[in-house]
């Protein structure tokens, strides 16, 4: 009996994330810091895999994209020109009774959600963090922690054109930390104050924006599904004019059905030529592109798909989470796509006896250059399988006493719990094929089916 994501609660997920080393509250021993999170050994592998999958799909597998990594601190004139100093704000209200502050957009009723107290009038609160450059803390030294990575790419537009050898349409892509002094945080890593963004600016000829807007919506929806997200848990929400960011004339959100309901996963915006023109006017530098096919000069339009890496991780975790009862015991498992799984293969010797350990260590040594591999010789084998299920490890390789005689090992598949027995010499190629999607029942020469759980 399987109870997929439907009955997942955030409490269960947060507890699993702590238990298995995915995500911890930041500075936990001091009581944490609201809106900040630390990724543990399993979490950092998952995060690197999500970022890597995005980078491969957006940058490395395309001819029309350039990668960049720009600085977090930028000349403050950037944020004046981009409109963030005046417009990157949320409406804030304060409870006159308990003095808690709320983002007005999040409230269903015009009273304090905690004590039902009366609220103040709305005022706009700029969510950019400020700090100072150099030893003097005055207005002339004020800089901002970037709230998005986009501006680093806009101000480098001409560098990309002159060194990137690309014709329009082409994009600049970037991943990196972003900071927002959110009025309220919540739902675990969904809305935090420090997070990682993965976004790109796709520069196009004005007039072609509708076509590219729809193209990127479809590409991005397909990316989530390719990595295993259930299409019924994704939906597209086209934004109304009044809900658009200050730089956009059209926008759509890819939403995911999180345990608390639908929430924004990724935003896709038509930013027009707004940012490039603003930077051109403020810096005095041309942001025009010379189209050598049509012999025209123009400032390109931009379509921008932008997703928080942490939000994507939350969606991948919610979607992969599963509970089932096996032999009267609860089995909790993350059915991660193999590309995202923090550990691909676990090597589990049945006992710590010296001769068995020697063979298991040999196998481990041969596999670890190829995949993220874990060696685990603690506790009973059933417990070790459960631990790997909770990490989302697609395959476990068990070395038993018969392995010493027949030089074979058992591979156990996470999702079906089926087992096959294969020659140790074929382990690497067999696991490579399985991780690339080969059916588990296909056997290498000399292999056999060991156990079929559900058939
Ligand atoms: N450059 C465009 C931009 O920053 P956005 O809609 O403000 O657009 C893009 O943010 C994405 O970043 C969102 O769709 C969401 O996935 C993520 N994001 C935004 N604020 C976040 C926060 N406080 N915590 C975690 N992720 C956040």
Image (cartoon, rainbow, N blue to C red):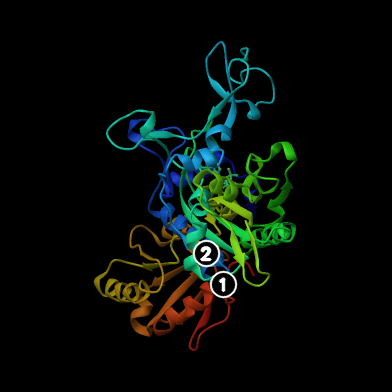
Judge whether residue 319 can be spotted in this image: yes
Residue 153, percent across and down? 50, 54
In the picture as drawn, the residue positioned furthest to the bottom comes out as: 445
Q: Residue at x 43, y 62 (%)?
A: 343
- Relative to residue 298, is residue 449 depicted above or below? below
**Nearer the observer, 301 or 93:** 301
Q: Tell me where residue 101 sits by quadrant.
A: top right
- Relative to residue 266, is residue 374 depicted above or below? below
Q: Mark 2 or 1 closer to N-term?
A: 1
Give the secondary structure at mark 2. helix
Q: Tell me where residue 9 sits by quadrant.
A: top right
Residue 182, percent across and down? 52, 33
Q: Tell me where residue 1 sits by quadrant.
A: bottom right
Judge whether residue 323 can be spotted in this image: no
- Relative to residue 306, is residue 100 depicted above or below? above
Callout 2: 10 Å neighbours few (<14), some, many (20+)? some
Residue 180, percent across and down? 49, 37
Residue assigned mark 2? 161
Residue 327, percent across and down? 56, 56
Callout 1: 10 Å neighbours few (<14), some, many (20+)? few
Q: Is residue 411 left or right of residue 406?
A: right
Give the secondary structure at mark 1. loop
In the picture as drawn, the residue positioned furthest to the left comes out as: 354
Q: Residue at x 57, y 77 (%)?
A: 438
Where in the image, quadrant-wise, is ligand 1 located? top right
Cα distance between the residues tagged 2 and 1: 14 Å
Residue assigned mark 1? 63
């Amino acid at each position: 009996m399987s109870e997929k994501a439907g009955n997942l609660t955030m409490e269960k997920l947060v507890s699993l994330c702590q238990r298995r080393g995915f995500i911890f509250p930041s500075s936990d021993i001091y009581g944490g810091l609201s809106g900040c999170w630390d990724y543990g050994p399993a979490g950092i592998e998952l995060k690197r895999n999500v970022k890597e999958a995005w980078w491969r799909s957006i940058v490395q597998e395309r001819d029309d994209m350039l990668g960049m990594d720009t600085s977090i601190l930028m000349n403050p004139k950037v944020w004046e020109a981009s409109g963030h100093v005046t417009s990157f704000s949320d409406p804030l209200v304060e409870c006159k009774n308990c003095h808690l502050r709320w983002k007005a957009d999040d409230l269903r009723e015009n009273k304090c959600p905690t004590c039902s107290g009366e609220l103040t009038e709305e005022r706009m609160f700029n969510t950019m963090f400020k700090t100072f450059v150099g030893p003097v803390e005055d207005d002339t030294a004020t800089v901002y922690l970037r709230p998005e990575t986009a501006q680093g790419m806009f101000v480098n537009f001409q560098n990309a054109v002159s060194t990137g050898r690309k014709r329009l349409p082409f994009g600049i892509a970037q991943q990196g930390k972003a900071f927002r002094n959110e009025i309220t945080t919540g739902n675990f890593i969904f809305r935090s104050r420090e997070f990682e963004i993965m976004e790109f600016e796709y520069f196009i000829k004005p007039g072609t924006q509708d076509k590219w807007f729809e193209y990127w919506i479809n590409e991005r929806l397909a990316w989530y599904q390719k990595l295993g997200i259930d299409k019924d848990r994704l939906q597209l929400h086209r934004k109304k004019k009044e809900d658009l960011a200050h730089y956009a004339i059209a926008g759509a959100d890819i939403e995911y059905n999180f345990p608390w309901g639908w929430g924004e996963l990724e935003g896709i915006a038509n930013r027009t030529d707004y940012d490039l023109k603003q930077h051109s006017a403020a810096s005095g530098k041309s942001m025009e592109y010379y189209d050598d096919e049509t012999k025209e000069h123009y400032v390109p339009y931009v379509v921008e798909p932008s997703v928080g890496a942490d939000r994507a991780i939350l969606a991948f975790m919610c979607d992969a989470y599963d509970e089932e009862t096996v032999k009267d015991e609860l089995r909790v498992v993350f059915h991660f796509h193999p590309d995202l799984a923090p550990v691909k293969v676990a090597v589990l010797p049945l006992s710590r006896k010296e001769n068995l350990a020697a063979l298991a260590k040999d196998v481990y040594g041969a596999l670890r250059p190829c995949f993220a591999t874990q060696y685990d010789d603690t506790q009973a084998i059933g417990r070790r399988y459960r631990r790997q299920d909770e990490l989302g490890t697609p395959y476990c390789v068990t070395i038993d006493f018969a392995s010493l005689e027949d030089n074979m090992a058992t591979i156990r598949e996470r999702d079906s719990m089926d087992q096959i027995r294969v020659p140790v010499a074929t382990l690497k190629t067999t696991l490579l094929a399985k991780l690339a999607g080969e059916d588990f029942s296909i056997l290498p020469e000399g292999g056999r089916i060991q156990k079929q759980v559900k058939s």
